[in-house]
Image (cartoon, rainbow, N blue to C red):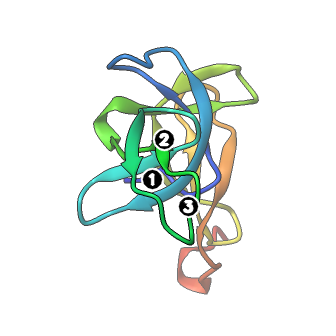
Amino acid sequence: MLIRTGDTVEIIAGADRGTQSRVIQVDREKGKALVEGVNKVYKHVRRSQKHPQGGRLSKEMPVQLSNVMFFCESCSSRSRLGARFSDEGAKERFCRKCGAGAGVISPAHASHAKR
């Protein structure tokens, strides 16, 4: 699971198919991600001090990670992510379509550096 918080993703299945949005939170144990503005449901709330009006609150629910695909800004399309070692020895994520880097997973190690 290479999807991280802050990534731009596209929903590939379900009612919100084709929607591009940002990942708010990732739950690795359950295999779900909370995506901004996607999979919205109504929660009925009773009147209280916190919610003096009460009524229906709209909130986002988690989406299965298999229904989410990384959106690469450099090639402007959705693609899978891969992991590779950079020349300095840092492990990084990359777009499998265009090869552009998508962020560092772990810091540089001398044993993985290309000589």
Q: Residues within 10 Å of mark 1 (few under 14, many from 20)?
A: few
Residue positioned 37% across, 45% down in the render? 44
Q: Residue furthest left?
A: 30
Report the side of 80 relative to 53 (left or right).
left
Q: CA distance from mark 2 to mark 1?
A: 7 Å
Mark identifier at residue 51? 3
Image location (x, y in percent) of residue 94? 58, 45
Image location (x, y in percent) of residue 69? 45, 32
Q: Which residue type does callout 3 highlight?
A: His
> How many numbered marks appear?
3
Nearer-N-terminus badge (2/1):
1
Q: Which residue is nearer to you in this view: 82 or 115? A: 82
Q: CA distance from mark 1 to mark 3?
A: 37 Å
Image location (x, y in percent) of residue 22? 63, 42
Q: Which residue is nearer to you in this view: 64 or 46? A: 46
Mark identifier at residue 81? 2
Image: 26 above or below 97: below
Residue positioned 61% across, 85% down in the render? 110
Q: Which residue type does callout 1 highlight?
A: Leu
Quarter occupied by the C terminus: bottom right
Q: Which residue is nearer to you in this view: 54 or 95? A: 54
Q: Which residue is nearer to you in this view: 53 or 36? A: 53
Residue positioned 55% across, 23% down in the render? 78
Read off the residue under disc 1: 2
Quarter occupied by residue 73 = top right
Q: Are marks 2 and 1 in contact (CB under 8 Å)?
A: yes
Residue positioned 43% across, 16% down in the render? 17
Nearer-N-terminus badge (2/3):
3
Quarter occupied by residue 87 = bottom right
Give the structural element (helix, strand or loop) at label 1: loop
Q: Which residue type does callout 2 highlight?
A: Leu
